[in-house]
Amino acid sequence: MKRLDRLLASPWRRAVVAVSAGALPVFAFPAPSWWWFAYIALVPWILLARSAPTGKRAAYDGWFGGLGFMLAVHHWLLPSLHVFTVLIAALLGALWAPWGWLVRRFLGGVSSPGQVGVALVVLPSGWLMVELARSWQGLGGPWGLLGSSQWQVEPALRLASVGGVWLLSFLVVAVNVAAAVLVSVRESRMPAVAGLVATAAATSAAWVWSPRPDVDGRVRIAVVQPGVVGGVGSGDKRFAREEALTRTLAGQDLDLIVWGESSVGFDLTDRPDLANRIAALSRLTGADIMVNVDARRSDRPGIYKSSVLVGPQGPTGDRYDKMRLVPFGEYIPARSLLGWATSVGKAAGEDRRRGTEQVVLNVGHGLRVGPMVCFETAFPDMTRHLAQDGAEVLLAQSSTSSFQGSWAPEQHASLAALRAAETGRPMVHATLTGVSAVYGPSGERIGSWLGTGASGTMVYEVPLARGVTPYVRLGDWPVHAALLVLAALCATEGARVFRLRRTAPEPHVPRARTAHESPARPGR
C-alpha cells in the first residue's frame, strides 16, 4: 500500500494511472462487448479520485480519466485524424474534472453512510451531465454513452424503453459507485448494498411494469451491402455492384429495399440514366428502393447526403437531407481556425451542407419509414421524434468503409438496438461495408448481421409494433431529474457555506494601544 502511495505521489504517474483507469470501460462496448464489465469498469477511476490529496488533484484525476475514456472509445479515429484525436480527447476529457471533484467530496476520507447515500445519486447525476454536454453535435455527439454498452441485455433494453440510454447510464454508474464503496469504505457498506438492491428492484419493476410493444403485422425489407469498392471510378463500380445485387432480389415479395450511405455518388437529377436504372430495379423487384445520394445538388449549392426514395416511375420526390454532420469527417468546425486538420489527417476538404428537418417517408406499400444517415443513429432524440411523427420503421443508412478492421462498425450497428428499444419501433441499419443489422421493436436482433467482409443481400422479416413507449412519451426525464439533483446539491452546499460563515467565531484581535500608552503599564 505504501508503495502504491509513493507511485501515486508523482503527478505524472498519477496522470498515467488516471488515463488507464478511464480507458477501461471501452471493453464493455463492441467489439469485445463485455457488457457485464461496465458495472465495475469505473471502480479503479473512482478509487483514484477518492484518494486524491486535494480537490484540485481529484479534478485532474477526473480530467485525465476523461481523456483516457474519450481516446479509448474513439481510438479507431487515430488513422484518420492522428494527433488531432488526442487533442479532441483532451478537450472533452475536461468535462469530467467536476465529476472527479465530486467523487472526492462525497467518498474521500472516512465517508459517513449519509454521504455514501448522497453519492449514489449525485455521482450518477454528474456523469449524466457530462454525457449531456458532450452529446452536443458540435462536440462530437453522443458516441460511447456508458448505457449503450448494454445493447444486448434484455432487461436493460426494457429500461431503455422507460428512460432511454440515459437511465441505463445512471444505473451503471450507481452500481460502480456502490462497488467502489464496498471495496474501500467498510464503515458505509450498508448504503452501498442498499443501492445495489434498489438498482435491482428498479430493473425488476421496469421488467414487470413497462409496456411491451404490441406486434401488429410484418414487412419484408431487404438490405443491399456491396462491400469495399475502391480505385478509379469507384462510384460507378459501386453502383454497378449494387445494381447486380438488387437484381437477385426479384420475386421475393419485398416491401422495401435499402442501400447504404453514399450508395449513389451522383445527383439523380443530373444523371437521369442512373435514376432510370434504379426505377427499373424497383419494377423488377416490386419494391421501392431507398438510396443515399452523396453529391453536389443541382437545385441548390453545396454537397448534401440525402436519403432518396425511388419507385417504379423514378424518384418519388421524397427525400431527407442529413442534418447532423460528423465533425471533421463531413465538416470542420470553425474552419478558419481549425482548417489545418486537413493537413494532418483525412478531414473534410469541403463542408457538407445540412438539412433543415426530419421527415417521415411513405413507401409504395403504405409503410411509413423514418430515415437517418450514419452518425445520426447515436442521437436518441432523433429516433424519438420520428416515432412521434408516425414512423413505423426506423432506417439508418451508413458507411464505415474508412474504419474496416476496427471496432467502429460493430459499435455503430449496436446503437440501433438501443434506438429500437427506446421507441418501440424496429430499426434497419444498412451499410456499404458492414455491419448491417436489423432489430425488432424491443431491441432484439432480427436475423443475422452482414459483417464487414460481406458483399451481398439479406432479407429480413421485420415485425411492426403499435403503442408508445414511456421514453417517447416522457422524453429525457432522467437528464432532467439529474439536473434537479445537482441544483439541489448546489443550493445545499451554498447554504452550508453561508451557515458556517455566520456561525464562525470572530478572530480575537488584541486591543490597540494609543500613542500615549506604555507597553509595560497599559493605560498610562
Image (cartoon, rainbow, N blue to C red):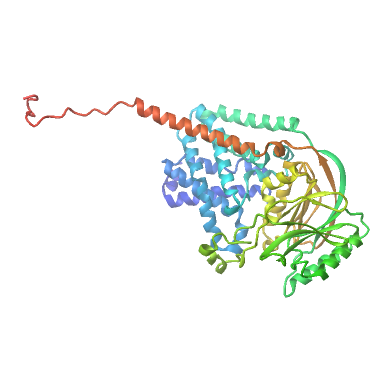
Q: Where is residue 405 drawn, in percent x and y?
A: 69, 61
Determine whether 402 is above or below 51 in the image.
below
Q: Nearer the viewer, residue 274 or 7?
A: 274
Question: In this view of the protein, which residue sits in the foreground, 274 or 166?
Answer: 274
Which one is in front, 430 or 74?
A: 430
Q: Position of residue 333 (x, y in %)?
A: 56, 59
| Residue 411 x, y percent position in the rendering | 68, 52
- Outermost right residue: 251
Q: Using residue 268 as the reference point, say whether residue 325 is left or right of it.
A: left
Q: Which image quarter is the C terminus in?
A: top left
Is 214 drawn above or below residue 61 in the view shown? Answer: above
| In the foreground, 59 or 321 | 321
Of all residues, the one furthest to the front in this rendering is: 299
Specify whether residue 30 is in view: no
Q: Quadrant of residue 494?
A: top left
At horizontal 62% and vertical 37% (from top left) the residue drawn is 478
Question: Is any atom of residue 152 visible in this view?
Answer: yes
Q: Is 80 left, or right, of 471 in this rendering?
A: left
Location of residue 99 in the rendering, given as x and y in whole percent from the top left corner? 51, 42
Give left or right: position of 31 versus 74.
right
Report the label total: 0
